Amino acid sequence: MITFLQGILSESLPTQIVVDVAGVGYQVFIPLSSYDRLPVIGAPVRVLTHLQIREDAHTLYGFMTVPERDLFRLLVNNVSGIGPKLALAVLSGMSVTHFKNAVVSNDVAALSKISGVGKKTAERVALELRDKLGVAANWEAASSAHAPTPEGTAINDAVLALISLGYKQVDAHKAIKQTFKAGGEVPKAEDLIRLALKILA
């Protein structure tokens, strides 16, 4: 099992990267949450990985933080109907903290706004993590210590709102990120949405 790669970042896209490890280029699929934390191309990088082995392919999925990889593995290994692509979509559409809070509070509406996750899948995710695995109880106990910041809440709400308006997840994420950089104060979600719509237009 390949658990991490350490080398030079040679290619970088919102959904995948190439890491040069001693002259060998490894293609790694990543969520948007990890893309935001990448260094510039040509810089050293250390990526945590999950290797999926199938008869027709060996595929690497990469993450910049341990909680991201843990949530990815939890979804892929324990929730029926969730494969690697959908697990990456979950991480791209919602932060780990917000995802845990949505499961703890059984917020199916928020989960179903993630690109690729319909209402039925959202209900299954919440149900299986709460009842079958019991992980929601542990998350609930820890939630007070890891409550989302006002900044994180505003960004998360704004991205989900843009997705519900029909914008692609990648575009919504980029636009919100641009608007957030523009101001120093933590704006409200509706302000972020308004500024992002100008960029997207």
Image (cartoon, helix red, strand yellow):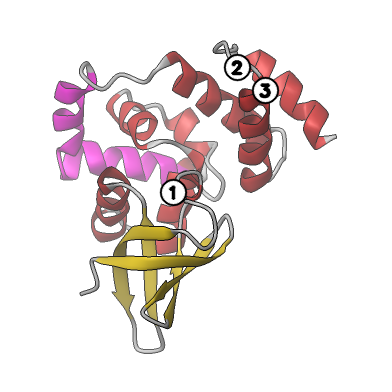
- The percent coordinates of residue 177 (x first, y second) are 61, 33
Residue 164, magenta (yes or no): no
Q: Residue at x 20, y 30 (%)?
A: 139
Q: Quadrant of residue 47?
A: bottom left
Q: Residue at x 69, y 35 (%)?
A: 175
In the drawing, does residue 199 fall left or right of residue 16? right
Q: Report the mark closest to the observer, 3 or 1.
A: 3
- Disc 2 residue type (three-letter): Ala
Q: Residue at x 45, y 58 (%)?
A: 30
What is the secondary structure assignment of the residue under circle 2?
A: helix
The magenta segment: 120-143
Residue 135, magenta (yes or no): yes
User: Earlier along the polypeptide chain: callout 1 or callout 2?
Assistant: 1
User: Earlier along the polypeptide chain: callout 3 or callout 1?
Assistant: 1
- The percent coordinates of residue 145 (x first, y second) are 20, 18
User: Measured along the vertical axis of the image, is residue 170 above or below residue 51?
Assistant: above
Q: Report the mark closest to the observer, 3 or 2.
A: 3
Residue linked to disc 2? 189
Measured Cα–Cα span from mark 3 to mark 1: 21 Å
- Disc 1 residue type (three-letter): Ser
Residue linked to disc 1? 34
Instruction: Using the image as rendered, state which of residue 131 and residue 190 is in the foreground.
Output: 190
What is the secondary structure assignment of the residue under circle 3?
A: helix
The answer to whether residue 83 is seen in the rendering is: no
